[in-house]
Amino acid sequence: MPVTSPIKVSAQTDELISDAAHHFGRTKKDIVDAAIREYIENHREELTASVRTSLARLDGSLPSLVSELTGLSRDELDELGGFGVGAGR
């Protein structure tokens, strides 16, 4: 059995999902699964470009990884205490 994870959507979106599931005779899970897959497929070029941009900013150091994950600049990370000696710049 595949592992599933709950997601949170607004009440308005949940109503749309429920209506679509009812009218298509499918489960809400099926509707959300199909919608997400279609969305990603339709935006694959944007997603690929974003991933490549993120990878280009990584230089193998801990600060570059934390910066990319948090959205904070290296200077902002230094203002918050940095990473100490040997962590890279």
Image: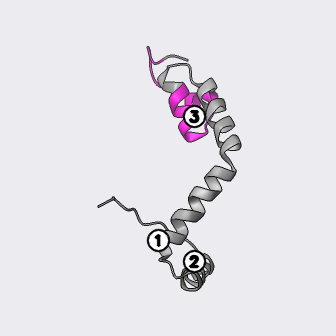
Q: Which mark is residue 29?
A: 1
Segment tinted magenta in the rendering: 64-87
SS at mark 2 in the image = helix
| Residue 81 in the image: above or below residue 39 | above
Q: Which residue is mark 2?
A: 17
Q: Earlier in the sequence, mark 2 or mark 1?
A: 2
Q: Earlier in the sequence, mark 2 or mark 3?
A: 2
As drawn, the residue found furthest toward the top would be: 86
Q: Earlier in the sequence, mark 1 or mark 3?
A: 1
SS at mark 3 in the image = helix
* Residues at circles 2 and 3 in contact by the CB criterion of under 8 Å: no
Q: Amino acid at mark 3?
A: Glu
**Pointer 1 local density, CA inside 10 Å: few below 14, some 14–19, many at least 20:** some
Q: Which mark is residue 68?
A: 3
As drawn, the residue found furthest toward the front would be: 25
**Pointer 2 local density, CA inside 10 Å: few below 14, some 14–19, many at least 20:** some
Tell me, yes or no, whether the highlighted magenta stretch contains residue 52: no
Question: Which residue sits at x=42%, y=66%?
Answer: 6
Tell me, yes or no, whether the highlighted magenta stretch contains residue 71: yes
Question: Which residue sits at x=49%, y=70%?
Answer: 30
Of tags 1 and 3, which is closer to the observer?
1
The tally of labels here is: 3
Question: Which residue sits at x=49%, y=20%?
Answer: 61
Mark pair 1, 3: CA separation = 32 Å
Q: Is residue 40 left or right of residue 61?
A: right
Residue 49 occupies which quadrant of the picture? top right
